[in-house]
Image: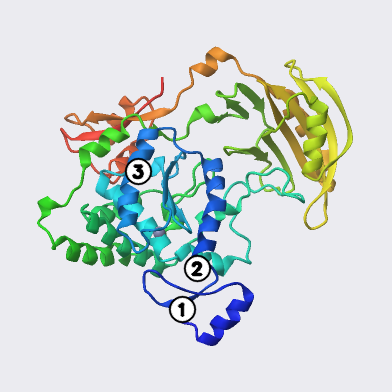
Amino acid sequence: MKPSTGICLAAVLVMTACATNPVTGKRELNFMSEAQEVQLGQQSDPEIRGEMGEYPNPALQQYVRDVGMRLAKASERPDLQWHFAVVDVPAVNAFALPGGYVYITRGLLAHLDNEAEMAGVLGHEIGHVTARHSARNYTRTATANIGVVLASIFVPKARPFMGAVQAGLGLAFLKYDRDQELQADSLGTAYVAKVGWAPSGMSGVLQALGRIEAASDSRGVPNWLSTHPQPADRVAKLTQTVQTLESARPASEWSVNHDPYWQRLDGLIYGDNPREGFVRGREFIHPDMRFRLTFPEGWKIANGKRQVSAAPPGVNDVALVLQLVESPAGASLEDVAVGSMKNSGFSLVNGESTRLNSGLPVYHGIYGGQTEDGGVVQVEAAHISHGGQVFLLAGLSSQARFRQAQPFFVEAIRSFATAPAGEMDRIKPNRLAFSTVRGGDTWETIAARSGGAIRASDLAVVNGFAPNSRPPEGRRIKTVIPGE
Ligand SMILES: [Zn+2]
């Protein structure tokens, strides 16, 4: 974009001004100053961390931060306050926010083969930040509806059940266009080479990620392919860049760091972590918080870090949501219930303090409120006291469907119960481990030895092979072991 001075002056009146692109050195129409970029990143970062969680391994976080910082210092914007984090989701992706916030998922770490590849991914995301891609895309979509990534429940006025629908997540997953992707590839590869990692890392990554489905994980976090379009010529274009960079030094001088990287992967959680809640049939079970409940037959259940929601398929004005509610010390359950609902824009119609079948104390009420477009929302809400916390389990519905939906809401509320400690303690996540390919092995036989913790095709892809390939005998490979 090369605006005339006139357009830039007009833009000043709208928001800010043209800014100089740090990568090209050219001035361009960009509604965001660096301070605004940083502010936007700062605002959205807690939403990303809150919704996805940070992977609870300080040594791994530090390792990723160290690699990321070395790359960032080699970039055109070494003085930004850079932040790097491993987020605790199984989706295979990496993404960045304006202002220097870069995230990589534990799912992607599991799929990489060495440190040079990880540097390639981080370098690519740093490239999006240094070239101000997300700042530009944000400017372009600022007035549009920022993408809703997680299960969309219809949201009444005043953003009551905060959580699922977050601008920050939409910002992180803004789609880049093809030119921006190519630019991030070449910028990232240049940073990687400048620090001394093999620049071929990024080509390896692109090939590996091309084998992973574009689908989303159970929390709605999209995989790489759905947010990083990969035109056929992208790998080819990058190959030229890589060859030019690589020829600058003898092959032996580029560092790949395969073994140190694999040591970091040992024991990494793979796939969904059932400790944070899992679905079994109609039941939702949360081992860490020790509760279970049964959702209505056939409803689609979405498990976010801050909110679980369920909705009948094809219906957008009926939903059940479950989340924690703040409860000030000394407040009665009724006060907590009525107060927090009021803060969310709902007024009490009627309610009573009682106990669920399981014996847990509950304040069960009916509330009314309005959607943004003026429609009436009715809510059947239970504030349940369990394990020293207050859970809100609420059925929301348009007025037209409330009578029909109410029995399902009531049934779900009645099913909420404490889960037995012994059974809950035995539930553990699957983890990455290592194994050696035996004579006659196929991906199927190795997957079978893992006790069903990973599918054969996924096992091949985690190891950088195509699913229809044959694992080379004697090779050390990654595998996944059940968590018990
Ligand atoms: Zn990208």
192 or 109: which is nearer to us?
Answer: 192
Q: Name the residue under label 2.
A: 136
Ligand 1 located in image quadrant: bottom left
How busy is the neighbourhood of tag 3: few (under 14 within 10 Å), some, or many (20 plus)?
many
Callout 2–callout 1 Cβ contact below 8 Å: yes
Q: What residue type is labelled 2?
A: Arg
How far apart in space, not on screen, are marks 2 and 3 (Cα)?
27 Å
Question: Residue 471, can we see it?
Answer: no
Q: Mark 1 points at which residue?
A: 1
Query: Which tag, 2 or 3, sits closer to the chain's start?
Result: 3
Q: Name the residue under label 3.
A: 64
Query: Which tag, 3 or 1, sits closer to the chain's start?
Result: 1
Q: What residue type is labelled 3?
A: Val
Quarter in which the C terminus is drawn: top left
Question: Residue 146, can we see it?
Answer: yes
In the drawing, does residue 355 fall left or right of residue 444?
right
Query: Which tag, 2 or 1, sits closer to the chain's start?
Result: 1
Q: Which residue lies furthest to the right in this view?
A: 350
199 or 42: which is nearer to us?
Answer: 42
Callout 2–callout 3 Cβ contact below 8 Å: no
Is residue 262 placed above or below 255 in the rendered structure? above
Element type at mark 1: loop
Is residue 181 placed above or below 462 in the rendered structure? below
Q: What residue type is labelled 1?
A: Met
Mark identifier at residue 117:
none
Is residue 153 placed above or below 243 in the rendered structure? above
Residue 109 position, x and y percent, is 35, 42
Q: Is mark 1 within 8 Å of ligand 1?
A: no
